[in-house]
Amino acid sequence: MRLEKIKLAGFKSFVDPTTVHIPSNLVGIVGPNGCGKSNVIDAVRWVMGESSAKMLRGESMADVIFNGSTSRKPVGTASIELVFDNSDGKAGGQYAQYSTISVKRQVSRDGQSNYLMNGVRCRRRDITDLFLGTGLGPRSYSIIEQGMISRLIEARPEDLRAFLEEAAGISKYKERRRDTENR
Ligand code: ATP
Ligand code: MG
């Protein structure tokens, strides 16, 4: 499963619909300070289900919606879509049959929020489920921000274990067991 495209609209500084293509496994985003590089990473975290505004460098969730500039009015909705190539069928279970998987999240100022998978409305849970055990996810090790390496080195054994379990693909089964036990 490989991320092919990030489609942004109304999200932070990306007011107009923009598609970021990821042509290979190693891609660098460069540009002057404040041009929106980190906003692209925030977008990826957000669509995968990040629910803490702080993790997205904002005060409230509505801060992800474009809030205007000197020349543009604020907009009412933000949306992000990730398009994955799944021709290797690595996305397991019911998703293995799809060669392309699209994951989308939208939010509007009135608080309406939607998640969609391949165009069909789904729960946040369905999105996090898809990524569990793949190393992808809003807070997984696939997104390495400043300070994370030292956090890993200094991590308590329990936290380190959580990273290892995610890397080994065990976290998915633990989550399901927790679910079953809570029923
Ligand atoms: P640096 O090189 O300094 O890390 P960067 O390229 O990572 O910069 P970002 O942090 O991605 O820059 O982008 C910051 C810009 O995004 C700022 O100009 C800020 O005003 C703008 N921005 C953030 N949230 C919004 C929003 N909701 N609406 C409009 N613009 C926003
Ligand atoms: Mg930055």
Image (cartoon, helix red, strand yellow):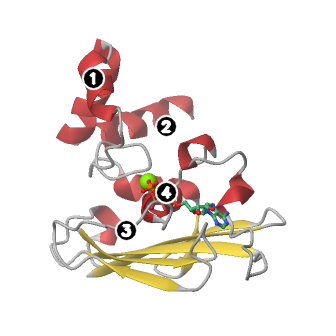
- Dot 2: few (<14), some (14–19), or many (≥20) neighbours within 10 Å? few
Residue identifier under label 2: 179
The label number, if any, that marks residue 66 in the structure image? none
Quadrant containing ligand 2 reads bottom left
Q: Where is residue 163 shown, x and y percent of the image?
A: 28, 32
Cα separation between marks 3 and 2: 44 Å
> Does the residue tagged 3 have its C-beta within 8 Å of any atom of ligand 1?
yes
> Does the residue tagged 4 have its C-beta within 8 Å of any atom of ligand 1?
yes
- Dot 4: few (<14), some (14–19), or many (≥20) neighbours within 10 Å? some
Mark 2 and mark 1 lie on one chain; the one further toward the N terminus is 1
Residue identifier under label 3: 31
Mark 1 and mark 3 lie on one chain; the one further toward the N terminus is 3
Which marked residue is nearer to the observer: mark 1 or mark 3? 3
The label number, if any, that marks residue 160 in the structure image? 1
Cα separation between marks 2 and 1: 22 Å
Query: Do the residues bearing badges 2 and 1 touch, measured as CB atoms within 8 Å?
Result: no
- SS under mark 1: helix
Query: Do the residues bearing badges 3 and 4 touch, measured as CB atoms within 8 Å?
Result: no
Q: Residue placed at 59% from the left, 70% from the top?
A: 13
The three-letter amino acid code for the residue at tag 4 is Asp
The three-letter amino acid code for the residue at tag 1 is Leu
Relative to 45, say whether 54 is above or below: above
Check the picture and name the quadrant holding the N terminus. Answer: bottom left
The label number, if any, that marks residue 42 in the structure image? 4
Q: Nearer the viewer, residue 113 or 151?
A: 151
Mark 3 and mark 2 lie on one chain; the one further toward the N terminus is 3
